[in-house]
């Protein structure tokens, strides 16, 4: 099959247009029907669509192109499939409770999702483009290729296994409100995020091999290295936008104010690394300065009850607990009199 030249020879414009059209199609359904079940599905499957189209358009099917295309398709398909399964079980996505009925705020999320898909797909998009396929490539099996395959496998297993473990834990009524500290969650509080990050850097490592080993020159050389924007963007997103920042301090605040297994949660955070997997027996003894730097547990994630808690909610909860305690004591006292 002859290669297809579409708008530009890096496939940047055509993949952007496809992504915008794909997301707007699903946005129209989600907004019109107030339907949450397609949102994450649209994001994950968009990666699959872009990989298939750019690989087909390239007209060249070098092993490296096939591997990175399959890798991002596997990741996108698994992610969208799991999130679709989860939303079908839960029914609604509370992320959109304040946006679902508002056109522009809701559209804003979908625009951001367009940028996420297009940016994270860059290593695969550029590797499959005519400006790269015109160059010879090193045989698949370079050091970067092997390291990338190993890292992808580790990341894919971590993300998949942690999603299953957390879903099973939360599906058990006996674990309602408890801290998920089983399996991979004993080593890191967010194994799924860590797995997702190394997956994207693994794909980049494989895609950039032609430039690393001197087979690609000129603007194509710079373009291939510039695709590191994809994994970096995903990392920034998970660490500072929609991942840890929405999970850590807000989650701790909610537990503290409601008294929902707060002490066990506090013990868990002290012994468990926030992102990088590490033995809890060692992590608990690591100095705070190292946790805040090397282990990436930055101050923006840390919850301080004195600074961040709504003390009125705490007082209300404590008053309610005191009333409930007195009721139990009175009931026990009454039972004792009856028996006497």
Image (cartoon, rainbow, N blue to C red):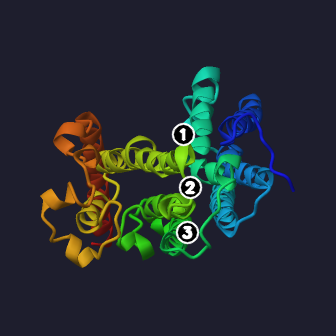
Q: Position of residue 33 (x, y in %)?
A: 76, 33
- Residue drawn at the location 26% of the way across and 42% of the way down: 314
Q: Position of residue 333 (x, y in %)?
A: 26, 62
Instruction: Give neighbour class at mark 1: few <14, some 14-19, many 20+ (Cα, 10 Å).
Output: few
Tell me the SS state at disc 2.
loop
Task: Judge by depth and name the residue closer to the eye, 185 or 310.
Answer: 185
Quadrant where the C terminus lies? bottom left
Q: Quadrant of residue 171?
A: bottom right
Instruction: Give neighbour class at mark 3: few <14, some 14-19, many 20+ (Cα, 10 Å).
Output: many
- Residue 95: give its label: 1
Is the C-beta separation of discs 1 and 2 under 8 Å? no
Q: Earlier in the sequence, mark 1 or mark 3?
A: 1
Q: Position of residue 45 (x, y in %)?
A: 71, 51
Can you tell which of label 1 and label 2 is closer to the viewer?
A: 2
Q: Position of residue 311 (x, y in %)?
A: 23, 37
- Residue drawn at the location 43% of the way across and 62% of the way down: 194
Quadrant where the N terminus lies? bottom right
Between marks 1 and 3, how big is the CA–CA gap? 25 Å
Instruction: Give neighbour class at mark 2: few <14, some 14-19, many 20+ (Cα, 10 Å).
Output: many
Tell me the SS state at disc 3.
helix
Question: Relative to 227, does residue 190 appear above or below in the rendering?
Answer: below
Q: Quadrant of residue 19?
A: top right
Task: Judge by depth and name the residue closer to the eye, 177 or 52.
Answer: 52
Can you tell which of label 2 and label 3 is closer to the viewer?
A: 2
Instruction: Give the residue pinned by disc 3.
Output: 156
In the visual, does 6 lie left or right of 290? right
Instruction: Give the residue pinned by disc 2.
Output: 216
């Amino acid at each position: 099959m002859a290669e297809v030249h579409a708008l530009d020879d890096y496939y940047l414009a055509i993949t952007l247009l496809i992504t915008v059209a794909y997301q707007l199609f699903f946005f129209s359904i989600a907004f019109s029907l107030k339907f949450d079940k397609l949102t994450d599905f649209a994001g994950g499957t968009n990666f699959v669509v872009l990989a298939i189209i750019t690989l087909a358009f390239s007209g060249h099917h070098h092993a490296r192109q096939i591997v990175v295309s399959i890798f991002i398709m596997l990741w996108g398909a698994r992610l969208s499939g799991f999130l679709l399964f989860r939303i079908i079980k839960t029914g609604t996505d509370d992320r959109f409770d304040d946006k679902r009925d508002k056109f522009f705020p809701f559209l804003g999320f979908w625009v951001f999702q367009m940028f996420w898909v297009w940016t994270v797909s860059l290593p695969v998009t550029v590797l499959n483009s005519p400006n790269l396929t015109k160059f010879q490539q090193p045989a698949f099996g370079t050091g970067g290729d092997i390291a990338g395959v190993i890292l992808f496998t580790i990341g894919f297993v971590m993300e998949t296994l942690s999603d299953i473990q957390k879903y099973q834990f939360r599906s058990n009524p006996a674990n309602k409100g408890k801290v998920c500290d089983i399996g991979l969650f004993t080593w890191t509080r967010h194994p799924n995020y860590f797995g997702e990050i190394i997956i994207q850097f693994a794909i980049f490592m494989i895609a950039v091999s032609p430039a690393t080993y001197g087979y690609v020159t000129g603007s194509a050389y710079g373009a291939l290295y510039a695709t590191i924007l994809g994994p970096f963007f995903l990392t920034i997103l998970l660490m500072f936008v929609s991942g840890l920042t929405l999970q850590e301090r807000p989650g701790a605040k909610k537990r503290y104010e409601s008294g929902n297994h707060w002490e066990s949660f506090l013990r868990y955070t002290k012994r468990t690394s926030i992102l990088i997997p590490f033995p809890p027996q060692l992590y608990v003894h690591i100095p705070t300065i190292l946790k805040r730097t090397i282990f990436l547990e930055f101050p923006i994630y840390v919850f301080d009850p004195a600074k961040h808690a709504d003390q009125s909610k705490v007082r209300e909860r404590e008053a309610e607990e005191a009333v409930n305690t007195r009721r139990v004591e009175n009931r026990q006292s009454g039972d004792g009199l009856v028996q006497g």
